[in-house]
Image (tube, helix red, strand yellow):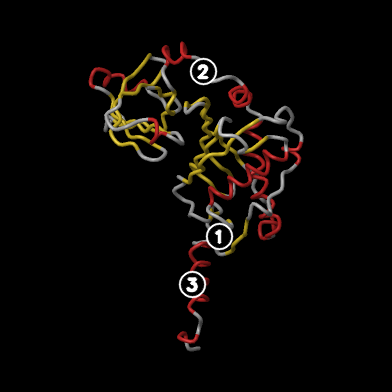
Amino acid sequence: MNLLKIPIILLLLIFAGVVVAGCGDRNIRLSDDGYNTGASLKNIKGYKDTQINLGSFYNNAAKAKRYAYFSTDKSVSYSTNSLLPDYMWYCFKKAFTEIGMLVNETDEAPSLSLIINDINDTGLKCDINLYKDDGLEYVKELIVTMPAVSGTADSDPTLLEKKAYDMMDAVIAALLNDKEFKTSLSKAPAVAVDKKIKGTLVGIVKAVDTAANEIIVGSGRIANMVSIGDTIYAETDGGRINMEVSFPMQTIARCRILEKDRKSITKIQKGDMVYK
């Protein structure tokens, strides 16, 4: 075959398919149009007419691609019809709308952002951030584990596709069933006296490197909430520990413990709330 006679657009499409599929021997195609809410979401009550805005969704999963994630053994790729975070965004929108929520209808509504930390065919880890009046009202890492597909059914593409959509159901249901999320969504923004006591919530501790004196703080809007040189602090079981922002990025900020609190770095734990 003379490759010169093959239309360039066809070559580009072939190349794109290889890139999306990555290292998976088989590819399961997913789309927000193909996703439909399951029974676990249809039975959720209490959100009718609740206002919410869906903000930015991000992909920080090291083992996922821009348009795909993979099975744990790398034999199957799950490719999405849009960027992986955008696919999840539209699934959230469809699910929220179907249970009666009013999505992206007013700028005054609380805004939800999501950060994918890890994803494969057996589970998903993601950070959920809920903002009100530009302040971080709710932050939590959701961890969803999916049952393994057993026996010969492992090779059934229809079953694998359903399992992928079931995982979206599971993470959305986990969020909606969280009482703290429901309370944060419905209550008024924190009053000024609370901000004087605890400050403004900017994120949570994602990682601690005691040897390097580095703390990683994360949230969906942290780049808009802190700047280089800002002093922020973690509320820990051992009290308040101050740190300086050394390198803010889109969803995380690298920080260093101030010298006066350096000996307290061992008291900081992953998941501690961080304020400014």
Q: Identify the amino acid type marked 2.
A: Ala
Q: Earlier in the sequence, mark 3 or mark 1?
A: 3
Discs 3/1, front: 3
With respect to residue 189, does 150 lie above or below?
below
Residue in front for this viewpoint, 68 or 52: 52
**3D distance between C-alphas at marks 3 and 1:** 24 Å
**Quarter of the figure with the C terminus:** top left
Mark 1 surroundings within 10 Å by alpha-carbon count, few (fewer than 14), some (14 through 19), many (20 or more): few
Q: Position of residue 109 (x, y in %)?
A: 58, 30
* Mark 3 element type: helix
Query: Please, what is the three-letter code of the amino acid marked with disc 3?
Result: Leu
Q: Residues within 10 Å of mark 3 (few under 14, many from 20)?
A: few
> Could you tell me which secondary element the residue under label 1 belongs to?
loop
Q: Residue at x 62, y 59 (%)?
A: 29
Q: Are marks 3 and 2 in contact (CB under 8 Å)?
A: no
| Relative horizontal placement of residue 177, taking residue 230 as reference (left or right) | right
Numbered tag placed on residue 87 in the rendering: none
The residue indicated by pointer 1 is 75
User: Distance from label 3 to label 2 (Cα)?
Assistant: 52 Å
Where on the picture, by quarter, is residue 261?
Answer: top left
Residue 220 as seen in the image, left or right of residue 241 = right
- Identify the disc placed on residue 190: 2
Please name the amino acid that badge 1 sits on: Ser
Q: Nearer the viewer, residue 53 or 269?
A: 53
Residue 275 location in percent, x, y?
40, 22
Residue lying farthest bottom?
2
Instruction: Single out the mark in the foreground, 1 or 2.
Output: 2
Which residue is at the front of the view, 133 or 131? 133
Residue that label 3 marks? 12
Instruction: Name the residue located 60 percent from the left edge and 23 percent from the top edge.
Output: 180
- Residue 85: x and y in percent read 53, 47
Labels 3 and 2: the sequence-earlier one: 3
